Image: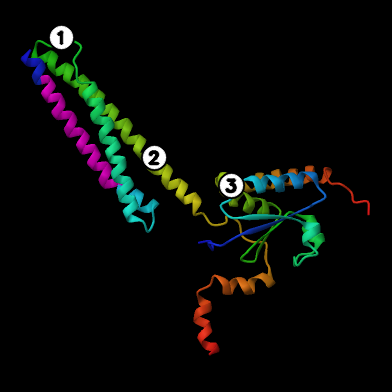
Amino acid sequence: MEPHDLSLVVYYDGDCGLCRRVAAWLDAQEQLVPITCLAAQQAAGGGCPISLEALLAQVTVTASDGAIYRGTNAWIVCLWALRAYRPWSLRMATPRWRPWAERMFAGIAGVASWTKRRRVS
Amino acid sequence: MDVTLYAYLAYVLISVALTVWVGRTLHKNGRAFLVDVFTERVDLADSVNHLLVVGFYLINFGYMSLALKLTEHVTTPTSAVEALSNKVGLVLVVLGTMHFFNLYVFSRIRRQRRIARAPRPVEPDGMLAKVMMPMAGMGDPGMSAASPAKE
């Protein structure tokens, strides 16, 4: 049984166009568990115990009960928090579909890296 | 003329008996499903069960009365039995369809509830040491058990 006051924080790369899009999409969805999206660059300074390098390397989700999810797990937990996508998240987590989920999210991460804007400063 | 009337009477009796039998079966066995769906809300389960059964009766009795009229001319007992079996067969098919539709509704409600209650499907990759402490105290009833030790 999940704690009734569970909430999630998603750390995304604020310099990546696709990541910002996905974050906005997450915000717009109907959430069974509240999600807060934070740009990693802003969060790393303000009290996030995970280093900026680690946050930028992979999508990271932290839950209010202290659990950390990275990469594919982070995606699955985000989908699980959305009313419309929870059935998908449950399916993706099964051994049968997990490899396909890994591939799909690796593909999205690849596309995301193309949309990354290089910081001049 | 008499034969037609007897056929009608038999049709009504058989159809009503069948509908009541299926309705009671649904009411009795559907309850277990709904109690599972509405955990800790048995009153709600009984209410939904009753409402579903009422809808079932309305549709079936409605169909029954609409389908009563015999179109072919019935003169002999043989033709009456034939017409009767035709009508009752239709009622049975409608009852069966309704019954499966009800089962579908039950299983759908049950599935949706199960999904709504599903825990996170993946194991965490790590735990935040900092957040763990205040969180353990906030929602945990174990905290109140620990507090008398301080006094």
User: Which amino acid, mark 3?
Assistant: Glu
Residue range (magenta): B7-30
Q: Residue at x 71, y 45 (%)?
A: A22
Q: Please give the residue where the numbered disc 1 appears in the rendered image.
A: B73
Q: Nearer the viewer, residue B87 or A24?
A: A24
Q: Residue at x 9, y 11 (%)?
A: B76
User: Which amino acid, mark 1?
Assistant: His
Q: Position of residue A76 (x, y in %)?
A: 63, 51
Quarter of the figure with residue B16:
top left
Q: Position of residue B14 (x, y in %)?
A: 15, 29
Residue at the extreme left of the image, as rendered: B2
Q: Nearer the viewer, residue B17 or A102?
A: B17
Mark 1 touches mark 3? (CB < 8 Å):
no
Q: Please give the residue where the numbered disc 3 appears in the rendered image.
A: A30
Quarter of the figure with residue B68:
top left
Pair 1/3: label in front: 3
Q: Secondary structure at mark 2?
A: helix
Asked if residue A42 can be seen in this view, the reply is: yes
Asked if residue A93 can be seen in this view, the reply is: no
Mark 2 touches mark 1? (CB < 8 Å):
no
